[in-house]
Amino acid sequence: MASLITCPHCGVRPKEEFTIRGDASPVRPAPAAEFAAWDEYVHIRDNVRGVMKEHWQHSGGCRRWLVVERDTFTHDVHGVTDAADFTKARAGKPAKAEKPAKAGKGRAKA
Amino acid sequence: MKYSAFSIFKQALSGNKGWTPAWREPEPKSHYDVIIVGGGGHGLAAAYYLAKNHGITNVAVLEKGYLGSGNVGRNTTIVRANYLLEGNEPFYSHSLRLWEGLEQELNFNAMMSQRGVINLFHSDGQRDAYARRGNAMRLAGEDAELLGREEVRELVPYLDFDNPRFPVHGGLMQRRGGTARHDGVAWGYARGADSRGVDLIQNCEVTGIRREGGRVVGVETSRGFIGCNKLGLAAAGNSGRVAQMAGMRLPVESQVLQAFVSEGLKPFIDQVVTFGAALFYMSQSDKGGLVFGGSLDLYNSYAQRGNLATVESVMEAACAMVPSVSRVKVLRAWGGVMDMSMDGSPIIDKTPVEDLYLNCGWCYGGFKATPASGWCFAHLLATGETHELAKAFRLDRFTHGRQIDETGHGAQANLH
């Protein structure tokens, strides 16, 4: 696992400052969506072996929620974005932030 | 070859040159009645009980590495049946009874040692919770004993009883719990299954599941296509990947859990002791090494290795519970890939795909379940019906709100 994570707001920070929540790919259904959609969102996972997007919170820093792109087999970190930008990008809207999130540098490898 | 005192004596006189391999290394046949994917504890136990309890011997166990190369060889060897909930306790109770007769059953030394498991508590609230758990265990026919502080001190005098934050108030003891030699369990089941005609096929990775008209007809493997009538998946941390080959997604996440062993010490810890102030458990192997572990690394992983932050927190817990281990050297640390289910309980069930059966979601408690898991999975594979003891371990229980959530953490896999 990478020991350094590049927070888009705080820069390069030790991994221990972050709290990992889990898979960022399930999309929260509308409140009135079908029961099956909610069941799938809450319980079913792709459980990727390879590059996966995860929700991390920079709990020991800016406290922003982030989306970390990480390989579940090699533990390499490929990129970090703010969760708000990630959600907008997924919904097809342009991200508010001017500078795109930087990928983890060489030092941030496992 | 039968193992006996006589065979040891005879081999000793003939220079130990007559021992034969414990199992064959057969070439895969083109078709089997049942194929089990995963040559770990659960897969091998299922194959053994298929042959023994149900007389089905045209069975293959496919293992991508060598037998027992996964979690059955990577755990902290603890055997116990101290669960709270109705869906769990009778199953684990049956498992413990199978453990008790396992060595005679398999004619193999699994070094089963019922040295007792003590769960420490450090507050009144925890005492109440353990009293409740102990009562639930006794209602299910298991042994459980609530020990006070002085009773614990007599058994385990070296704990930090007066830790200002986590004083030891007592512990819940299950005397029939203990440890077993994990590899020995896999080898014993493998030998037992092999001698009954089961083909154990190593270095044979399943790369696809072939279906015709909705039914499973066989598996694509690194050693070619192998046909089958029924397919059982017991792939632990890789369950999600194998299930995906049949177009299924599971309520399971794969996460890494680490374990540790120290240098050999003189006899020091007689029981399995678990800390109540953090997730931490420790026992001492017969060789003298302290065997211990803590919580998950808390992120999804398919790598059989963890990271140093978790190592540090496990060592902290060790020193908080038993301060005298602070200068003990750790010899080895390793990681295993856990199939963490969404409620912390396992799945032994049919799947929506016909003739495909699933055994997964063991989280980090799969080792103690090995005999009963094999027993119930074999029953399911042989009869198509769920075994009475495993009827709560349904795949669709999440959809219907019938979770078996011992910790009450909800659908957050890394918290179970």
Image (spheres, coloured by chain):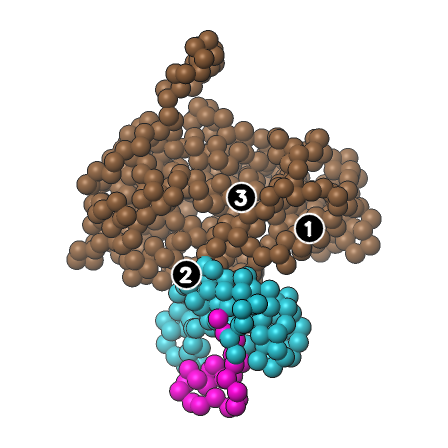
Chain colours: A cyan, B brown
In the image, what residue type sits under mark 2?
Arg
Name the side, left or right, on which B197 lies relative to A108: left
Residue A59 position within the rendered picture, expressed as x and y whole percent measured from the top left: 64, 73
Residue B20 position within the rendered picture, expressed as x and y whole percent measured from the top left: 37, 22
Residue lying at 38% horizontally and 43% vertically, measured from the top left: B65
Residue topped by disc 1: B315
* Residue B180 figure quarter: top right
The mark found on residue B75 in the picture is 3
Magenta highlight on residue A93: yes
Q: Residue farthest to the front?
A: A106
Q: Nearer the viewer, mark 3 or mark 2?
A: 2
Residue B284 can be seen, yes or no: no
Looking at the picture, does residue B321 appear above or below residue B114? below
Looking at the picture, does residue B60 appear above or below residue A92? above
Q: Which residues are magenta?
A: A78-101
Mark nearer the N terminus (3 vs 1): 3
Q: Are marks 3 and 2 on the same chain?
A: no
In the image, what residue type sits under mark 1?
Met
Dot 1: chain letter: B
Name the side, left or right, on which B40 lies relative to B195: right
Dot 2: chain letter: A
Q: Secondary structure at mark 2?
A: loop
Q: CA distance from mark 3 to mark 2?
A: 22 Å
Residue topped by disc 2: A49
* Quadrant (top left, top right, bottom left, bottom right) of the C terminus of chain B: bottom right
Q: Secondary structure at mark 1?
A: helix
Q: Secondary structure at mark 3?
A: loop
Question: In front here: B227 or B413?
Answer: B227
Magenta highlight on residue B177: no
Q: CA distance from mark 3 to mark 1?
A: 17 Å
